[in-house]
Image (cartoon, rainbow, N blue to C red):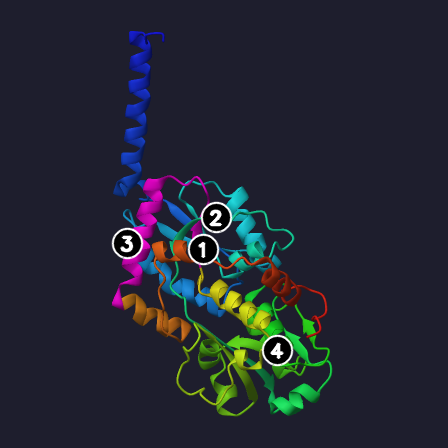
Amino acid sequence: MKKLTVSAVLAVLAVLVCVTLVERGYAQADFYKGKTITVVQIVAAGGTGDMRRRALFPYLQKYIPGNPTILSEYMPGGGGRKAANHVYRVARPDGLTIGGMSSSLVTNAILDTGGVQYDIDKLIYLGSPVSVFHYAFLTRKEAGLSNLEKLRAATGVRIGAQEVGHDVYIVGRLFAYLLDLKKPRFVTGYGGPEIDVALARGELDGRANALETLEQRNVEEMKKGLLDLHAVVEIPRGNRPQGYAQLPEIESFAKSDSERKMLAMYRAFRQVGTPYVFAPGTPKPLVQILQDAIRKTLNDPDFHRDFKKLSGFDASPLMPEEQEKVIRELPRDRTVVELFKKLSGADSLPPR
């Protein structure tokens, strides 16, 4: 083995010193001072998802040393794939771009959905303010579909959603499939609030929506009895807000073990929450800074107050380490995946 020359040893030491100084620089408060963090959102402005993030941003700014400016870049499209691909493939891993995702991040990846250009096992997870969800399937009163019998007897019920692959689209398809609707039509291309407008105009007959959103955004329609609710999905199973005990849980309509396993897979996808992520390669000191800021935010009682004020429901935090564990343990059974792919895709629903 050749001996290292004095100059070579000095060069190696210089590199090590530089690396150490850089890492120390990342860990110091002045790294983020005067900088701007961009959160790439998979949603459009103004919806419930946007409100959740607006509640989070002031606290992240407070708890990140240096108190950087935090801005949103709205990038809806492709059921979340557009934003996820951008964060994974385009954004620089410099700690200044965060992906504000939804569960479609993992759903699309596990289902091998076309256009996915990211690897969920390589992304860096920062946590989520939400891990509990309740979706209901509803129709407008004027459609005359006031109960399950009338709903099942109708043909071609028009169900609104944002786009193929979006959470609302997928859960709407699950409801239609398990409730045995006849040749339902899925109409996409809306923003979340726009679906409500289309319902009010009679352009749509029904939709899936979060109960929490209904209690915030659709208060008047609920009070006036303009919406008929038919069934609910509990995530996790057995968790349901007060006032909806009369609604059947979607699993009560499952007819086989494969359908029950498919629902278990769906619940697991949703329990990932609304992940905040860094691209692979983001320096560990910056990851630690953001994860620590997320932890402090999610443990702050004032954040919980403001979150409920803006979003209309309670936060259900998922810490970074818990989120990483959920990702590792996601069910990936290929038989169940194939059924889920058929249900969440653009083709007609499969026969039962």
What residue sits right under mark 1 in the picture? 327
Looking at the rendered structure, the secondary structure element under dot 4 is: helix
- Give left or right: position of 304 versus 212: left
Q: Give the extent of the magenta segment.
A: 275-301
| Front of the two marks 2 and 3 | 2
- Give left or right: position of 4 versus 90: left
What residue sits right under mark 4 in the picture? 178
> Whole-Å distance between the Cαs marked 3 and 1?
26 Å
Residue placed most toward the observer, 341 or 135: 341
Looking at the rendered structure, the secondary structure element under dot 1 is: helix
User: Which badge, 4 or 3, comes first in the chain's sequence?
Assistant: 3
User: Which badge, 4 or 2, comes first in the chain's sequence?
Assistant: 2
User: Which badge, 2 or 1, comes first in the chain's sequence?
Assistant: 2
Amino acid bearing label 3: Tyr
> Whole-Å distance between the Cαs marked 2 and 1?
7 Å
Magenta stretch encompasses residue 297: yes
Determine the residue positioned at 65% across, 53% down: 114
Determine the residue positioned at 46% across, 42% down: 280
Determine crowd level at label 3: few under 14, some 14-19, many 20+ residues with C-alpha closer than 10 A.
some
* Residue 63 image label: 3
User: Which badge, 3 or 1, comes first in the chain's sequence?
Assistant: 3
Amino acid bearing label 2: Asp
Determine the residue positioned at 30% across, 53% down: 293
Q: For the residues labelled 4 and 2, say whether their Cβ atoms are less than 8 Å apart.
A: no
